[in-house]
Image (cartoon, grey):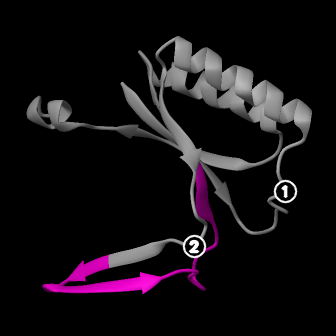
Amino acid sequence: MRFLMMTTDDSSSAGSPPDERVAAEMGRFIEEMSKAGVLLATGGLDPLPTRIESSGGKITVTDGPYAEAKEVVVGFALIETRTKEEAIELSKRFWQIVGDGKGVIHQVFGPEDLAAGQ
C-alpha cells in the first residue's frame, strides 16, 4: 500500500531551517526508511503553487498565494507499507523528530489498484 504523507503550514510558523540535532536525526530516519525500501520519494514544496481548474471546457490557471487558503502543503513523503497503521507509525516518528506541526496521510491508488476495482 502506498501513502502520501504531507506536511502543511498555516503561515503561523516561522519556517526556519531545522537545528543541527533535528537535521541529523531526520537524516538518519530518511536513510533508515530508504534502506528498508519504505521511502519512495520525499521533498519540500513551494508554498506558492499554481492552481489549474477546468470547468465547462475552460481551463483557468491562477498563481498563488490564495487569500482563501488557510494552509498549504510544504513537504511530502511517498511511502510504501503493508498497512495504514504502519504509515501512521512512520508519521508519528517523523513528528517526534520535528516537533510541532500538522500533516495529512492519503492512501495513493495506482493504475494496478484501479484495474483491480479498488
Q: Does the magenta stretch include residue 15?
A: no
Residue 40 visible in the picture: yes
Which image quadrant for residue 90? top right
Give 85 or 50, whichever is nearer the viewer.
Answer: 50
User: Label 1 vs label 2: CA separation?
Assistant: 17 Å
Q: Which residue is drawn at 30% across and 86% down?
A: 60
> Does 53 sit left or right of 7 as displayed?
left
Q: What amino acid does circle 2 point to?
A: Leu
Residue denoted by label 1: 16
Give 95 or 74, whichever is nearer the viewer.
Answer: 74
Classify mark 2: helix, strand or loop. loop
Q: Residues within 10 Å of mark 2 (few under 14, many from 20)?
A: few
Q: Does the magenta stretch include residue 62?
A: yes
Which image quadrant for residue 47? bottom right
Q: Quadrant of the N terminus?
A: top left
Residue 41 position within the rendered picture, expressed as x and y whole percent measured from the top left: 48, 35
Q: How crowded is mark 1: few (under 14 residues within 10 Å), some or many (20 or more)?
A: few
Residue 56 position within the rendered picture, expressed as x and y whole percent measured from the top left: 15, 86
Residue 77 visible in the picture: no
Specify the segment rendered in magenta: 53-76
Q: What amino acid does circle 1 point to?
A: Ser
Residue that lies at the very extreme toward the top in this rendered image: 36
Q: Which of marks 1 and 2 is nearer the N terminus?
A: 1
Residue 36 position within the rendered picture, expressed as x and y whole percent measured from the top left: 52, 11
Residue denoted by label 2: 48
Q: Residue at x 41, y 76 (%)?
A: 51
Classify mark 1: helix, strand or loop. loop
Residue 37 position within the rendered picture, expressed as x and y whole percent measured from the top left: 46, 16
Q: In which quarter of the image is the C terminus?
A: top left
Q: Residue at x 72, y 20 (%)?
A: 28
